[in-house]
């Protein structure tokens, strides 16, 4: 396959890619492909049993976890608290609305 590939074939291929994607998006596309390849290589190393991979782009596990609900508050109490906050916001919005119309 490479024997039939001439340098002018590569030039035409590059021109077609630039025309299709535009010169502005090519650096972003190349950067995202590079990141994807880096993650892919790290994951394949994990599967083969090599040393654990450390993803530079990935967030630490602590930030991805959803915070646990406090055990002392029940769902009904949380709903009531959220409803109270919503009512306060509606009152504030209603109070701010006449001031905006007067301006």
Image (spheres, grey):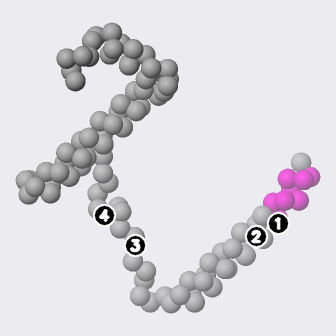
Residue at x 67% of width, y 80% of height = 84
| Residue 29 on image: x %, y % | 40, 33
Q: Is residue 35 above or below residue 69?
A: above
SS category of the residue bearing label 3: loop
Which quarter of the figure is the N terminus placed in? Answer: top left
Residue 84 marker: none
Please tell me the numbered disc located at residue 67. 3
Query: How far apart are the alpha carbons under marks 2 and 4?
Result: 35 Å
How far is the residue under mark 3 from the one under mark 1? Answer: 33 Å
Which span is picked out in magenta?
95-102
Mark 1 element type = helix
Q: In the image shown, does 27 or 78 lie closer to the viewer? A: 27
Question: Camera-side residue: 71 or 36?
Answer: 36
Spatial separation of the CA atoms under disc 1 and disc 2: 6 Å
Which callout, 2 or 3, points at the residue further toward the start of the chain?
A: 3
| Residue on which disc 4 sits | 62
97, above or below 67, in the image: above
Instruction: Decide: is 58 above or below 15.
Output: below
Judged by depth in the image, the label closer to the viewer, 2 or 3, is 3
Q: Nearer the viewer, mark 3 or mark 1?
A: 3
Please name the predominant secondary structure of the magenta segment in the image. helix
Counting other residues with Cα less than 10 Å from the Cα at mark 4, is it few (<14), some (14-19), or many (20 or more)?
A: few
Disc 2 and disc 4 in contact, CB within 8 angstroms: no
Q: 61 above or below 38?
A: below
Can residue 20 be seen in the rendering of this structure? yes
Q: Which residue is mark 1?
A: 94
Q: Earlier in the sequence, mark 3 or mark 1?
A: 3
**Label 2 sits on residue:** 90
């Amino acid at each position: 396959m490479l024997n039939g590939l001439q340098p002018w074939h590569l030039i035409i291929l590059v021109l077609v890619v630039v025309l299709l994607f535009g010169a502005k998006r090519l650096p972003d596309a190349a950067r995202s492909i590079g990141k994807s390849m880096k993650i892919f290589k790290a994951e394949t190393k994990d599967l083969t049993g090599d040393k654990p991979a450390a993803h530079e782009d990935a967030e630490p596990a602590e930030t991805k976890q959803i915070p646990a609900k406090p055990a002392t508050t029940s769902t009904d109490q949380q709903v009531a608290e959220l409803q109270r906050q919503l009512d306060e916001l509606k009152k504030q919005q209603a109070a701010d609305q006449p001031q905006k119309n007067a301006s």
